[in-house]
Image (cartoon, rainbow, N blue to C red):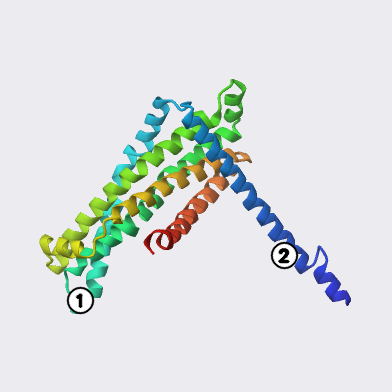
Amino acid sequence: MSRQSSWVLSPSGFAGRSLASVARSTSLVAEHAGQLGLLVWHIGVSTVRFRVTRRDMMRQFYIIGIQSIPIVLVAAALIGIVTSQQGGYQMQSQIPLYVMGSVVVESVILEMGPVLTAIVMVGRVGARITAELGTMTVSEQIDALRSVGRDPVEVLAAPRVLAMIISMPLLVSLANGVGILTGMYSAQYTLGLGSETFFYGARLFWHNYDMLYSLTKALVFGAAVPLIAVHMGLRTTGGAEGVGRTTTHSVVFMTLTILVIDAMFPPLFLN
């Protein structure tokens, strides 16, 4: 073996560094997966044993669900308007206009409503949870809870996760309704498409399981976002700078998770 080949295969060479990087990445992914699995188990046990207080969960439901309604409705209205306008541009003089009803309804319910609502919740709720718990972790408030016999998962994590699991299907239902209505009014204003014709087209291609599909997607997103946010917050280190860094990583992690889950839904539930 030549000296150059030996250097490439050595720990300090290209192949050695590449293998070390792959090993570190694999170890980090396994660590995250293991900690998330333990967090899910711990929250499940706390819930089944009724260790999560109703007061904490209702407080988080108000913060996560009720206070998110305005921004979700604004996003949903814009979703309906943009979907209607883009569809109308594509269909001019080529496809019957009543098909616009199906385009708007199916696009909003199956895709745009759940996904964009989840992304809005990542920015409004997920980042807040990570920053909040991250600050408590680096300031040793989490350790203080443990020292007085309180379980941080029961007190902090479980109420937030359960509240968002409950909130997301409700928010997505509101977003779907508002998106369809604004899409209908936009089509009426820009294309002259009446509401009867709009809903006629929507009924032609409607499937009974479409709403169930949308709410199932919302339920999965509602579990994934707070779990990742809590997980990242509880493993924060490095003071204020670490909180900012972890929050950024958490938002990226949550957004990519939503897109990956969204890509997995059609082959699993629509085929």
- Residue 239 coordinates in the image, percent (x, y): 61, 39
For disc 2, the neighbor class at 10 Å (few under 14, some 14 to 19, many from 20) is: few
Mark 1 sits on what residue?
Answer: 95
Secondary structure, mark 2, is: helix
Residue ID at (40%, 41%)? 165
For disc 1, the neighbor class at 10 Å (few under 14, some 14 to 19, many from 20) is: few
Residue ID at (37%, 62%)? 270
Left or right: 204, with 116 as reference point:
left
Residue ID at (44%, 36%)? 160
In space, the residues marked 1 and 2 are separated at their CA atoms by: 53 Å
Q: Pick the quarter of the image with the N terminus.
A: bottom right
Secondary structure, mark 1, is: loop
Q: Pick the quarter of the image with the C terminus.
A: bottom left
Left or right: 96, with 41 as reference point:
left
- Indicate which label's residue lies in the foreground, 1 or 2: 1
- Based on the displayed image, in which of its 4 quarters is residue 240 positioned? top right
Identify which amino acid the numbered label 2 is placed on.
Ser
- Residue 105 coordinates in the image, percent (x, y): 25, 60
Q: Nearer the viewer, residue 223 or 183?
A: 223
- Based on the displayed image, in which of its 4 quarters is residue 38 positioned? top right
Q: Nearer the viewer, residue 49 or 79?
A: 49
- Residue 69 coordinates in the image, percent (x, y): 30, 43
**Rendered view: 170 above or below 93:** above
Mark 2 sits on what residue?
Answer: 18
Identify which amino acid the numbered label 1 is placed on.
Ile
Q: Nearer the viewer, residue 7 or 155?
A: 155
